[in-house]
Amino acid sequence: MAHRVHTHWYMVEPGKKVRRKDWDPNDTSGFDGGEDEAREESVVLDAALDELQDKLYAEHKRKVLIILQAMDTGGKDGTIRRIFEGVNPSGVRVAHFREPTPDEKAHDFLWRIHQQVPGYGELTIFNRSHYEGVLVERVHKIVPKEVWHRRYRQINNFERMLTEEGTTILKFYLHIDADEQRKRLRERLDDPNKQWKFSEDDLKERKHWDGYMKAYEEMLQKTSTEYAPWYIVPSNHRWFRDLLVATIIVKTLEGFDMKYPALLQDPRSVRI
């Protein structure tokens, strides 16, 4: 299918310095239309993704790992719900990474991550990921600088190994600004159906906004590679966020040129 979104505009070029001010969270210029047109495009993308994921599962030759990172209210859950709402759950899995358990802390920081990577035919979505080790653990000084700093190299080596073993990795940073976060936190408080999402921890984390922005800039710069690049997704407008992420996923799966496996016998010979 022909795509109307300029996805390459949002990819972080490996080795290039990342400055958050250069990436506008309100940007929608990569699409030659507005929200109504995006809704129409999304219908086509939904149908394409449904078929492509079905082929991925049936062919059983490839693995896809999607990584979502964002500040609180950035839209990780909403992105997953919107893009994969019509996909057959067979072969699709979401992995959430909370605070490490005592057993997980007793191992290296990638130990629990490796257990969740996709197998052949699977599409796995990381809602937060191993990148917490260079974000939360850095900002809150849970580990010293020499530890989180070497993790950039360890992450790159880990992702290189996964790609060499047949995993395609798509990494999305859902980019919002502080004003949009304030607006979304207020929406949670004002809507009885969303109040359950609100936590005092969100306000505590918001106080570290500048520290997180610095950590994200360095993370994006040091871990966007040719084999696993980051996409900075402008996410103040939810409709554009979902459109961009869905387009990148569909284009990637289309590039696999997948086929449904052929029956090993003549179907006419089968008596039912």
Image (cartoon, grey):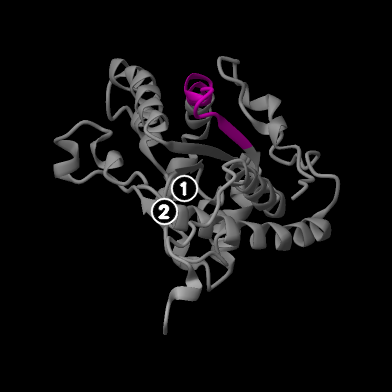
The reply to whether callout 1 and callout 2 are in contact (CB within 8 Å) is yes
Q: How far from the left and from the top, in percent, is residue 141?
A: 32, 27
**Left/right of residue 63 with respect to residue 29 in the rendered view:** left
Residue position marked by numbered label 2 in the rendering = 200
Residue furthest to the bottom in view is 272
Asked whether 106 falls inside the magenta stretch, the response is no
Under mark 1, the amino acid is: Leu
Task: Using the rendered view, name the quadrant where residue 89 is placed.
Answer: bottom left
Which is more toward the observer, 214 or 132?
A: 132
- Residue occupying the point 38% across, 48% down: 120
Task: Using the rendered view, name the quadrant where residue 5 is placed.
Answer: top right
- Residue occupying the point 37% across, 18% down: 153
| Range drawn in magenta | 218-232
Q: How far from the left and from the top, in percent, is residue 217?
A: 54, 24
Q: Residues within 10 Å of mark 2 (few under 14, many from 20)?
A: few
**Left/right of residue 79 with respect to residue 129 in the rendered view:** right
- Circle 1 sits in a helix, a strand or a loop, which is it? helix
Which is more toward the observer, 92 or 24?
A: 92
Under mark 2, the amino acid is: Glu
Q: Which mark is residue 203?
A: 1
Q: How far from the left and from the top, in percent, is residue 166?
A: 41, 36
